[in-house]
């Protein structure tokens, strides 16, 4: 990320949150093929392996791919012998994911989730939760915790910053630092397993992504 200038400020109330998410989904639905061509070859094998290694269990594991986009990682989880379900807010992406991965995909807004209780061994939130306004994040994390089985694992990868948030080039974005992200997750009933920065092998100031793993407790 090189420009975190907000077009308007934090979405603190329900009306602002709904508007922020609606505009973000319109942005993604406006050019789905371009997004797919730009992201289909991204290597997130480190993140997929981190989630699977943290889960106590054998394939097939039930994985919720939160913000599955056009289905790149859904397909990979299937190839590895697991049973993923996608969740996507943008209708164009949801259709593309079903076609590409051959998986079930639920079309839901991140701030209005309707998830079955204790259904998943893991939640894979790769480049997705940073779109959730921080005022809505406790509720969203509570929903994700509830859909995990006991000792289930949540993986997240977000672009990091100094806790700025707002509209950014047509999308709502939150750029949490680790301390802020840790506070949100622990308050929601998760305990940290591990965290790391990406891309690997670069100086920290060039590692713009914060990846973290969390276990459901209680």
Image: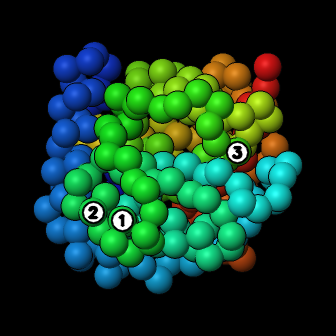
Q: Is residue 38 above or below residue 81?
A: below
**What residue is disc 3 on?**
121
Q: Nearer the viewer, residue 155 or 180?
A: 155
**What residue is disc 1 on?**
98
Q: Position of residue 44 (x, y in %)?
A: 59, 71
Q: Could you give the CA–CA distance between mark 1 and mark 2, rounded to whole angstroms?
A: 5 Å
| Lower sequence index among marks 3 and 2 | 2
Q: Is residue 201 left or right of residue 136?
A: right
In which quadrant will I find the N terminus? bottom left
Q: Position of residue 21 (x, y in %)?
A: 26, 38
- Taking the spot 38% from the left edge, 47% from the top edge, the residue there is 106
Say which element carries label 2: helix
**What residue is disc 2 on?**
95
In which quadrant will I find the C terminus? top right
- Disc 3 + disc 2, Cβ < 8 Å: no
- Taking the spot 33% from the left edge, 40% from the top edge, the residue there is 108
């Amino acid at each position: 990320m090189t420009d975190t200038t907000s077009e308007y400020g934090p979405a603190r109330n329900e009306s602002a949150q709904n508007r922020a998410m609606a505009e973000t989904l319109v942005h993604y639905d406006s050019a789905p093929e371009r997004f797919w061509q730009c992201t289909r070859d991204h290597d997130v094998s480190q993140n997929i392996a981190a989630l699977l290694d943290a889960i106590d269990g054998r394939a097939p594991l039930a994985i919720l791919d939160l913000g599955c986009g056009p289905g790149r990682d859904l397909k990979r989880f299937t190839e590895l012998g697991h049973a993923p379900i996608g969740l996507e807010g943008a209708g164009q992406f949801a259709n593309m994911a079903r076609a590409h991965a051959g998986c079930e995909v639920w079309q839901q807004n991140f701030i209005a989730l309707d998830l079955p209780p204790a259904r998943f061994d893991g939640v894979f939130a790769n480049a997705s939760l940073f779109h959730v306004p921080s005022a809505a994040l406790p509720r969203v994390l509570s929903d994700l915790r509830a859909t995990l089985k006991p000792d289930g694992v949540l993986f997240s990868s977000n672009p990091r910053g100094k806790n700025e948030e707002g509209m950014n080039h047509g999308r709502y974005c939150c750029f949490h630092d680790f301390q802020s992200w840790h506070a949100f997750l622990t308050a929601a009933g998760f305990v940290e397993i591990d965290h790391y920065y990406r891309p690997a092998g670069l100086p920290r100031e060039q590692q713009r992504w914060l990846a973290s793993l969390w276990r459901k407790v209680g």
